[in-house]
Amino acid sequence: MTRIYSLLFIFCISFSMQSQLLTGENKQFSRADTLRGSLRPERTSFDVLSYTLDIQLDPKQRFLSGFNKIEFRVLEETSKIQLDLFQNMEIDSIVFNKTNLTYQRDENAVFINFETPLKAGTAERLWFYYSGYPVVAKNAPWDGGFVFSEDQQGKPFIAVAVQGTGASLWYPNKDHQSDEPNSADIKVSVPNGLMNVSNGRLIEEIPMDNGYTKWHWRVEHPINNYNITLNVADYAHFEDAYQDLSLDYYVLKENLEKAKQQFQQVKPMMSCFYTKFGEYPFQKDGFKLVETPYLGMEHQSAVAYGNKYQNGYFGNDMSNTGIGLKWDFIIIHESAHEWFGNSISAADIADMWIHESFTAYAESVYVECQFGKKEAITYLYGLRNIIANDRPIIGKYGLNHEGSGDMYYKGANLLNTLRSVIDDDEKWWKLLKQFHETFKYQTIHTRDVIAFYDENTEMNLSPIFDQYLNYTDIPELQLKFEENKALSMRWETDVDHFEMPVEFQNSQERSIKREVIGNEWKSLDMQLEDIQDLAINRFGYYIKIKQVDD
């Protein structure tokens, strides 16, 4: 096993990569936050089975209209349910058993009344007709909404991204991550000469009488609300395959040759992720990269790509190591979300670290597959420069609140730390694959993640997760160097009963020591002539180190 060591250091933080919808620690939560983020009887009384979204989009007017047929199973008898649609969108009617239902709007929530209570165990359906001018994003994908752009020929180039903001920005749904439809049909009509690309498989291209063409796509796996998407342009299409998985690419015609070259990264990526995470989870729906007028988004089976056919993150290397310029960030990161975020989903956005930490770590997994472990760990270490340690990674539950943007690379370095704690690469990769296989197609919580790793390692990793996820500070390894040249160590943490191993050596010697350290001082069987001779594995562990006086 390759190990990387360096001399004693005190780690300093410089700046932070912000998450897509970073919310301040002192945010005053509104009624809209509560209505969107909480689970009340109006939501828990039913389970969504499928959506059939059928809309028409007018690019010139930036206007859409249509309906969503929502099929659901009643879990508890109820006379009222909550669906969601942004206030600026008009409700034309809500139809159930050929009868118009009454409803009340409260912020972006829609409370729908049934004259006769719905019985538990029954499967029901309603048609939700609506229209309006959906919100236009100012800076997608960091704020939610539509992006209306043009290609080089002046033809419409349109897409939508709504993670965090909410899918109810543009279509009615039960807008909470805990409930995913098992399937979806997405039908989008656009002017002739344009194409719509959505999630899943293309079922039919239907000419309409009004100068529009309806593009019908079908999703046959569970899907997050925010992942349901549309992409409209005069697209060129080319295809490939990896094993039994279809690979489809939709790009602007002026970028076809560049795309054919850049997208060659997909097959080695699939080879890596199949090995480390398991088979692609949406085989029935296939895999697509779709060019968009914004940077990117993990839309399930229709990954949004806008990185301008260049390596790095829009041509930059966030790790500042040069390693990030060897591959296309958007292809790798957003595609990794197919395993973490799309297949395994957080039930509350307070736990969005489950999406972003594992996916950010997947970047280093790809690096390791392509360039080796040393490069992967160097890449992760370089990313520490954009960790802020400003707020907890976990947000506030039930309030539509995400934690710190550190969920990306503090989270990735947490996972790298756990790999070092487990200290068995064969076991680590087995666990990572088993984690995906255990929870695929499910919505889960932080407690599920911790329980999985505790049970399958037979270790108490809960305090480690707790410190990195729920507190701003990372563990501080305190060193005490006695006059007799004896060395003692302890962890300074917010969490009680914290234990984590440390790997170190006398830099004048070859032997590596590994000791489990707790919150109490522990004397080590190690003599040093000078504290500067102490080398600690700071690449494998994301920690601070501090020498203290007696």
Image (cartoon, rainbow, N blue to C red):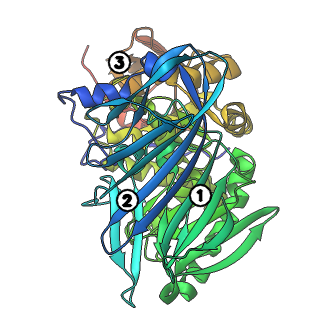
Q: Amino acid at mark 2?
A: Met
Return the disc, 2 or 3, that comes first in the chain's sequence.
Answer: 2
Disc marking residue 493: 3
Mark 1 and mark 3 lie on one chain; the one further toward the N terminus is 1
Q: Is residue 316 above or below residue 84?
A: below
Q: Residue at x 64, y 75 (%)?
A: 264
Q: Residue at x 47, y 17 (%)?
A: 79
Furthest residue in direction right, as rendered: 244
**In this rendering, the label closer to the viewer, 1 or 3:** 1
Mark 1 residue element: loop
Measure how far apart labels 2 and 1 are at the Cα level: 30 Å
Q: Give the structural element (helix, strand or loop) at label 3.
A: loop
Percent position (x, y) of residue 541? Answer: 47, 35
Residue matched to label 2: 318
Which amino acid is tagged 3? Thr
Q: CA distance from mark 2 to mark 3?
A: 28 Å
Distance from the alpha carbon under mark 1 to that under mark 3: 45 Å
Task: Choose top left, top right, bottom left or bottom right for residue 454.
Answer: top right
Where is residue 293, by image quadrant?
bottom left
Residue 352 position, x and y percent, is 44, 36
Amino acid on which disc 1 is placed: Asn
Q: Which is more N-terminal, label 1 or label 2?
A: 1
Query: What residue did someone put label 1 on?
Result: 199
- 124 horizontally vs 281: left or right: left
Q: Nearer the viewer, mark 2 or mark 1?
A: 1
Q: In terms of depth relative to the viewer, which is nearer, 83 or 220? A: 83
